[in-house]
Image (cartoon, rainbow, N blue to C red):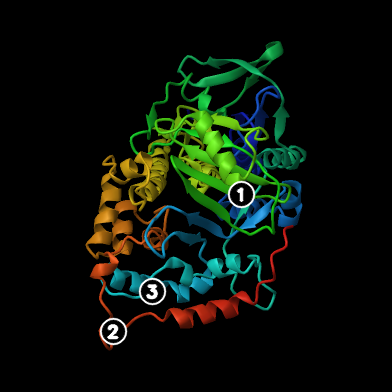
Amino acid sequence: MSTGSAPRVVVLGGGSAGWITACLLHHEWAARGGSVTVVESPAIGIIGVGEGSTPQLKAFFDHLGIEEAEWMAACDATFKLGIRFTGWSEREGCESYFHPFPGPVDLHTEPGFVKNCGLRRRGIEVPAHPDDWFLATHLAKSGRGPVPQANFPFPQSYGYHFDAHKLGAFLREWAVPRGVTHRPLKVEDVELDQSGDIAALLCEGGERIEGDLFVDCSGFAALLAQQKLDARFLPFAENLFNDRAVVMPTSHAGPIVPQTESNAMSAGWRWSIPLTSRVGNGYVYSSRYISDDDAAAELASALGVAADEAQPRFLKMKVGRLENSWVRNCLATGLSQGFIEPLEATALHIVIATALDFAKAYESGGFTDAHRATFNQRIAARYEGIRDYIVAHYRMNQRTDTDYWRENATNQSLSDNLKAMMTAWFTHGSIEEANAKAYGPAAPYAPMSWHALLAGYGTFPPPAKMQEPPPGLDVADREATGKMLAACALNFPEYAPV
């Protein structure tokens, strides 16, 4: 593939992933003569349950110049300050913890948290629960939003909750007037040229849509990358047991809190995502440990929904990634590219990162495939790093009540990088140094996230082996930190969804 100019891009599939990718590539290349066409069949629906995000989604909208008030109202969106994990540990005092999106204020409190974690790992009884050290946690607990008053100079990092169907529709309505072509057609076949590249999509009614570059957003089917170009899929089944989800929305029973909830269940975990119009609920589980019917019944019971009133929707998850996201003249994004279960809401994060990194690699190579190998290596490393962090949630869990949790805690199918992170924690090594060595300067998770996970579970020496801190030991002051964070929180208005 060697065009030397901005390409004609054809995106197969809509939904959030397809339209995010289309918007970004159009934004990057329209002024250079490139074009973007999205082909999606009205008869093929989207999965539509990826309704949480990281702060990367805010960066996406800022990049395109789309105001929050415009898109959030159209997509029933709410703010997200982080994730509350409940029931993942049986250790006293660690039954729940909050994984925040850190902001500038936390630069002053995180060192104290890390210091106390180091002392606690050595058996010194000092406060080291993550909930005490980060502003986002205080904001969520006090029902405050992430946008400060104008006189407070430190912005808070945040993500969103949103209706996935409405997000894709909003982006389509935003993109088409700005030059993206939308073709609501069903693709019946794919034409390859003599070199083996994709030449055109063959659609119903005999229509042929040509392009220089094709983006596969066709979902788990991966119609272009896997079915036509034989891209290899690498499953994560040995690392991550979950392969199913059951979805069951409910109405609001109280005020909206700007956080995602992740609650442990007998054979997985359930999410609770507050939108302005409803609460999205789902149970992610392993079919090896529970049947679909029993999972639906367990979710309905947890939500207080009568079994005869529940309307469950079941999903099968294809967990893993393509060996190469860029194959010949095809880029796979979204579910076509891979899927790591939604525990940390990374799906759209990866889509955005993939599209931006690809645009940079393709253009810097003179709009050729010169940098394809290095691009694929970077994306693969990102997937592996995110996978490791999510595997750590299961491998380090502190539950003993079911086979599911016990077998996750003894799972030995771990990457060398994850083993190195665990070794550093339990041998009192530097998590920052271990993270940099394992995952490099582009590590998908900061040392703070690893500390929050491992300290939040209470993976310290047992209480019987803890010792009182000796006189004169430099211990971070939790009480002073709490007062400072509480004072900062007063600069954030009470949360009122857009």
**Quarter assignment of residue 15:** top right
Name the residue carrying label 2.
473
Name the residue carrying label 1.
273
The residue drawn where x is 64% and y is 59% is 257
Seen in the image, is 84 located left or right of residue 430? right
Per the image, label 3 sits on a secondary structure element best described as loop
Q: Amino acid at mark 2?
A: Leu
368 in relation to 167, above or below: above
In this orientation, which residue lies closer to the viewer: 190 or 382? 382
Which quadrant: the C terminus?
bottom right
Q: Is residue 51 visible?
A: no
Per the image, label 2 sits on a secondary structure element best described as loop
**Quarter assignment of residue 7:** top right
Name the residue carrying label 3.
127
- Which of disc 1 and disc 3 is earlier in sequence? 3
Q: Are marks 3 and 1 in contact (CB under 8 Å)?
A: no
- Which of disc 2 and disc 3 is earlier in sequence? 3
How far is disc 3 from disc 2 in space, using C-alphas? 13 Å
The residue drawn where x is 56% and y is 40% is 299
Residue 418: give x, y in percent of width and height.
30, 49
Classed neighbour count for the residue bearing mark 1: other residues with Cα under 10 Å, few (<14), some (14–19), many (≥20): many
